[in-house]
Amino acid sequence: LTLRNGLLTALPERFACLGALEELSLCENLLTSLPNDFGRLATLKTCCLLHNRLRSLPESFGQLSALEHLELAYNPLVRLPDSFCELAKLCSFYAYHAAIEALPDDFGALRSLRHLRLDSNSIQRLPPTFGQLSELEELRLGENMLAELP
């Protein structure tokens, strides 16, 4: 499903009923939040939400068990829910030019992660588990507030 360059400010509460959806691109809209049951999109593999107005993700986000590729760049996203660390198949995560201040403590549980871009955020420290991301091939952390690495 692709709905790019629009004026969407919200998704209908029944959006998660699209249970067979594998690809979702809602880039360049005006979304400020996602439905609480967004995590019910159990077959979703690719999710692009670039250039919206998302400040947070619902706690159910970690239930996206098939998710492999996620783009959240250019959103005023301040934090990720703790459940984010349950995205076991996540290979690519792009959240550059956001407003993320900290990563969940268990971020290192994302062991399938190969591409990670968190540049241009407000991250002050990385969780101690960060070193467990042994599959990383690409890591961009520039333009943050990091004073040390774990």
Image (cartoon, grey):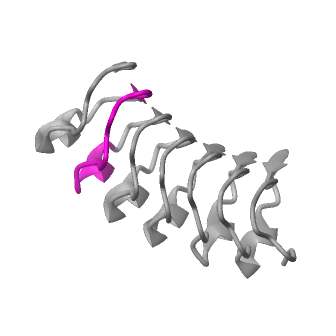
Residue at 31 percent of width and 47 percent of height: 32
- Give coordinates of residue 130: x percent, y percent: 75, 70
Residue at 23 percent of width and 50 percent of height: 35
- Give coordinates of residue 76: x percent, y percent: 48, 52
Q: 127 and 31: which one is in front?
A: 31
The stretch of residues the image draws in magenta is 23-41
Decide whether residue 26 is among the magenta residues.
yes
Q: 56 and 134: which one is in front?
A: 56
For this view, does 33 lie left or right of residue 95? left
- Quadrant in the picture for the C terminus: bottom right
- Quadrant in the picture for the N terminus: top left
Magenta stretch, overall SS: loop
Residue at 61 percent of width and 75 percent of height: 106
For this view, does 101 lie left or right of residue 25? right
Residue at 50 percent of width and 34 percent of height: 50
Decide whether residue 81 is among the magenta residues.
no
- Give coordinates of residue 120: x percent, y percent: 70, 51
Which quadrant holds residue 60? bottom left
Using the image, determine if residue 120 lies above or below residue 81.
above
Which quadrant holds residue 29? top left
